[in-house]
């Protein structure tokens, strides 16, 4: 193919594959024997491709007993499936029983909690407010002394000095 | 008797298998290029359909569902092979002789082998469309349903795939 004809390469392939030749390509072909020959060659290639592609599927047939084999396998799978419902129902029953017991227990617990007698409540409150007798020992004079720390140069005992007597 | 058969799920299922087995097998074969593997995958697809048969009683629904499932199963298996690499060459060369049984021409056989290799090398989106389009009883609409793409996209990808393969025919 001439260098000037390079731009016709793609339209030539399109024409070969679709069977439709664009008008400008048709006009060009009339004056260019090389492109006309190229189109024929690409068309032949496309035809060969379309002949060979279906051959890729030749021989792709399921075996004669395929259906029987599938049905046998389905039957075996179905038998396994049919055995399952009993197990499923047993599990469902057990789960339902557990749920019922749990609901009963929770309800019972709530009811018991609501019925606390008044005297028990008063006793509980009294217990909460109870203080140990040793709490009173903490309020000693020494506590007050400990709370006030002497500053630098000061003593714990503050004895007033009588300056007049000294003089 | 006939009524009892119609009520039996296995009987209805058997009819569906008979209607779809050839196409389902070919979809698997188109991807795997191996009869034994295609058979296993096709059987697996039908077994899955059997488990869901209550919701797939409608013939059209069954057809679309089983097409999609077998294609996915075949792709999964092929990816497994590719990962192991051992089967990679088998994918391209297995059963070539059987496929060109009618074509005695050695040159044609070589071209077919080369073509199969090139199809395997196509980008996946073009390869998938081409493989499914080669299955008998599959039109652009069916291919689109399997791949989840519009019919127009199927046609355009098929055109591109053919264009890419045109150079192999030199």
Image (cartoon, rainbow, N blue to C red):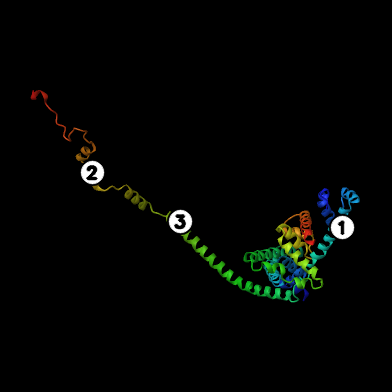
In the foreground, A31 or A26: A31
Q: Quadrant of residue A153?
A: top left
Front disc: 2 or 1: 1
Q: Is residue A159 left or right of residue B1?
A: left
Label 3 residue SS: helix
Which subunit holds the residue at mark 2?
A: A
Dot 3 and dot 1 residues touching (CB under 8 Å): no
Q: Give the mark nearest the N terminus, 2 or 1.
A: 1
Label 2 residue SS: helix
Q: Give the mark nearest the N terminus, 3 or 2.
A: 3
- Return the residue at label 1: A40
- Alpha-carbon neighbours of circle 2 within 10 Å: few (<14), some, or many (≥20)? few
Mark linked to residue B151: none
Which subunit holds the residue at mark 1?
A: A
- Alpha-carbon neighbours of circle 1 within 10 Å: few (<14), some, or many (≥20)? some
As measured in the structure, the alpha-carbon distance from the residue carrying label 2 to the one carrying label 1 is 117 Å
Query: Where residue B79 appears, x then y in whole percent?
Result: 65, 63
Q: Is residue A69 left or right of residue A162?
A: right
Give the residue at x 22% y 38%.
A144
In the foreground, B53 or A106: B53
Give the residue at x 80% y 65%.
A52
In the foreground, A59 or A157: A59
Q: Give the mark nearest the N terminus, 3 or 1.
A: 1
Rendered view: B20 above or below A131: below
Q: Residue furthest right?
A: A30
Q: Quadrant of residue A67?
A: bottom right
Mark linked to residue A138: 2
Front disc: 3 or 1: 1
- Return the residue at label 3: A110
């Amino acid at each position: 193919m001439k260098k000037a004809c390079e731009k016709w390469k793609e339209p030539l392939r399109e024409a070969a594959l679709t069977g439709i030749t664009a008008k400008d390509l048709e006009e060009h072909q009339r004056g260019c024997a090389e492109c006309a020959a190229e189109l024929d060659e690409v068309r032949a290639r496309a035809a060969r491709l379309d002949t060979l592609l279906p051959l890729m599927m030749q021989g792709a047939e399921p075996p004669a007993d395929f259906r029987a084999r599938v049905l046998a396998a389905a039957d075996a799978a179905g038998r396994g499936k049919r055995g399952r419902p009993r197990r499923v129902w047993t599990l469902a029953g057990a789960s339902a029983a557990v749920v019922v017991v749990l609901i009963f227990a929770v309800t019972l617990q709530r009811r018991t909690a609501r019925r606390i007698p008044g005297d028990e409540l008063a006793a509980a409150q009294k217990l909460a407010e109870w203080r140990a007798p040793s709490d009173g020992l903490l309020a000693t004079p020494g506590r007050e002394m400990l709370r006030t720390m002497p500053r630098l140069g000061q003593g714990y005992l503050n004895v007033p000095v009588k300056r007049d007597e000294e003089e | 008797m006939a009524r009892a058969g119609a009520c039996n799920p296995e009987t209805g299922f058997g009819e569906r298998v008979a209607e779809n087995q050839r196409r389902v097998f070919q979809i698997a074969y188109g991807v795997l290029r191996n009869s034994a593997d295609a058979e296993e995958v096709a059987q697996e697809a039908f077994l899955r359909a059997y488990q869901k048969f209550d919701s797939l009683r409608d013939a059209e629904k069954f057809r679309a569902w089983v097409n999609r499932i077998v294609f996915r199963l075949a792709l999964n298996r092929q990816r497994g092979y590719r990962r192991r690499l051992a089967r990679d060459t088998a994918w391209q060369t297995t059963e070539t002789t059987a496929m060109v049984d009618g074509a005695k021409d050695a040159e044609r056989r070589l071209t077919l082998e080369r073509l199969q290799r090139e199809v395997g090398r196509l980008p996946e989106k073009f390869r998938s469309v081409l493989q499914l389009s080669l299955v008998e009883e599959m039109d652009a609409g069916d291919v689109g349903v399997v791949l989840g793409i519009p019919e127009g996209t199927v046609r355009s990808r098929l055109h591109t795939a053919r264009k890419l393969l045109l150079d192999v025919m030199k």
